Amino acid sequence: MNINMLIEQIEGNWFTQSTTYFLTRSIINHYKHQVVFKEIKNVKATTHEIQVALKKIYVQYKEIDVQVALLKCSDYQECKNFYTIFVYLPENKNGNIWKIKSDGKLIGQSMFQVGFSNSIFIEYKSKNLKIFEQIYFINDNLKIVKSVINIDNKPASVCFSSEIKIS
């Protein structure tokens, strides 16, 4: 899988239904929302802040052969827009993901590894929080996501999601 194949799998208008089980409180939450991912091919069409953030990322990888993609993400339920930058190192079949607000502020950073059979594995870390996600691209219109959230190296929540592309 290369960066173009990965972006093709992610891009689109997705309806997500998630179930999260909080292990420490024995509570189950259900969540539905709609998110649109659109690749931005003309970086100059973005804000100055996004262009600056992209330049900083490019500087980090200037000596390495990488593939970079920028996606704009729109979450309709929360009325939020943010950008996701994928940096893929094809030689290692892994990379990094940056989520950035429209004003250029970093929301979060994670690492990903391309797996077998159209899947990727993502690991987020922040202080005492770790999130492990496995995303399975079943076909062009269906993704299954399994997430485990650890707090202080102990499992705190498990989440299962199905995502259906509606356009």
Image: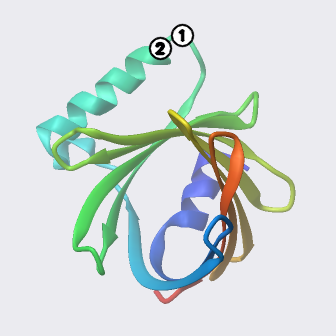
Residue plotted at (67% across, 46% down) = 2
Q: Is residue 151 above or below residue 30?
A: above
19 relative to 91, above or below:
below
Q: Residue at x 86, y 54 (%)?
A: 116
Q: Is residue 53 visible?
A: yes
What residue is disc 2 on? 62
Q: Nearer the viewer, residue 147 or 22?
A: 22
Left or right of 81 on screen, residue 13: right
Q: Is residue 146 left or right of residue 108?
A: right
> Which residue type does callout 2 highlight?
Lys
Distance, label 2 to label 1, CA atoms, is 4 Å
Q: Residues within 10 Å of mark 1 (few under 14, many from 20)?
A: few
Task: Decide: is 56 above or below 3.
Answer: above
Residue 31 drawn at (x, y percent): 49, 83
Q: Residue furthest bottom?
A: 166
| Nearer to me, 2 or 71 | 71
User: Which class describes the residues within 10 Å of circle 2: few (<14), some (14-19), or many (20+)?
Assistant: few
Residue 97 visible in this rendered orientation of the protein: no
Q: Quadrant of residue 51?
A: top left
- The reply to whether discs 2 and 1 touch (Cβ–Cβ < 8 Å) is yes
- Percent coordinates x, y for residue 37 in the rendering: 41, 66
Residue 94 position, x and y percent, is 69, 36
Quadrant of residue 112 within the rendered picture: top right
**Secondary structure of the residue carrying numbered label 2:** loop
Q: Amino acid at mark 1?
A: Glu
Residue plotted at (61% across, 71% down) = 25
Q: State the mark number for residue 96.
A: none
Mark 1 — residue? 63
| 104 versus 154 height, above or below | above
For the point 28% across and 31% down, the residue is: 53
The image's colouring method is rainbow
